[in-house]
Image (cartoon, rainbow, N blue to C red):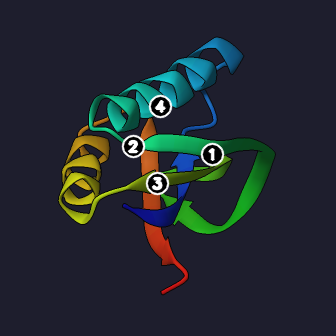
Amino acid sequence: MRDYELVTMVKPDVDEDGLSETIDKLGKFIGDRGGEVNESDRWKKRKLAYPVKKFMEASYVLTRFKLDAVSVKELELEIRNWEEVLRYLVVKVGN
């Protein structure tokens, strides 16, 4: 398993409960595939430099986790289908 960081941009109209639900869903997905979430950090809503799907701001969530490469691809495919997520980026940390 490798270390990864995931930054997720969530629609601004998602309330705190919805944001918590999204974070829990993400943690469950990683845990079900044998990975582990090391840290999940909510950032406040931030203004975007340009519109993304007609939104000018988004809530950001940074998640640090360990997972194997095949499961990371599955995670990306899964997140792509989540309605509340505007954009995401997964980055491998370290070697």
For image coordinates 40% across by 25% down, the residue present is 28
Q: Secondary structure at mark 1?
A: strand
Q: Amino acid at mark 2?
A: Gly
Is 27 situated above or below 72? above
User: According to the image, label 3 marks what residue?
Assistant: 66
Disc number placed over residue 91 in the picture, else none: none
Percent across and percent down for residue 39 are 68, 45
What x and y, as percent, mark residue 83? 34, 33
Residue that numbered label 1 is attached to: 38
Find numbered disc 4 in the image and state the secondary structure of the residue it sits on: helix
Q: Are there few (<14), some (14-19), or many (20+) residues within 10 Å of tag 4?
A: some
Residue position marked by numbered label 4 in the rendering = 27
In the displayed structure image, the side of residue 41 where residue 18 appears, left or right = left
The residue lying at 55 percent from left, 30 percent from top is 23
Furthest-right residue in view?
44
Q: Which mark's residue is nearer the viewer, 4 or 1?
A: 1
Considering only vertical position in the picture, is 49 above or below 73?
below
Q: Position of residue 13 (x, y in %)?
A: 61, 27
Q: Residue furthest bottom?
A: 95
* Cβ atoms at labels 2 and 1 below 8 Å apart: no
Q: Is residue 22 above or below residue 95?
A: above
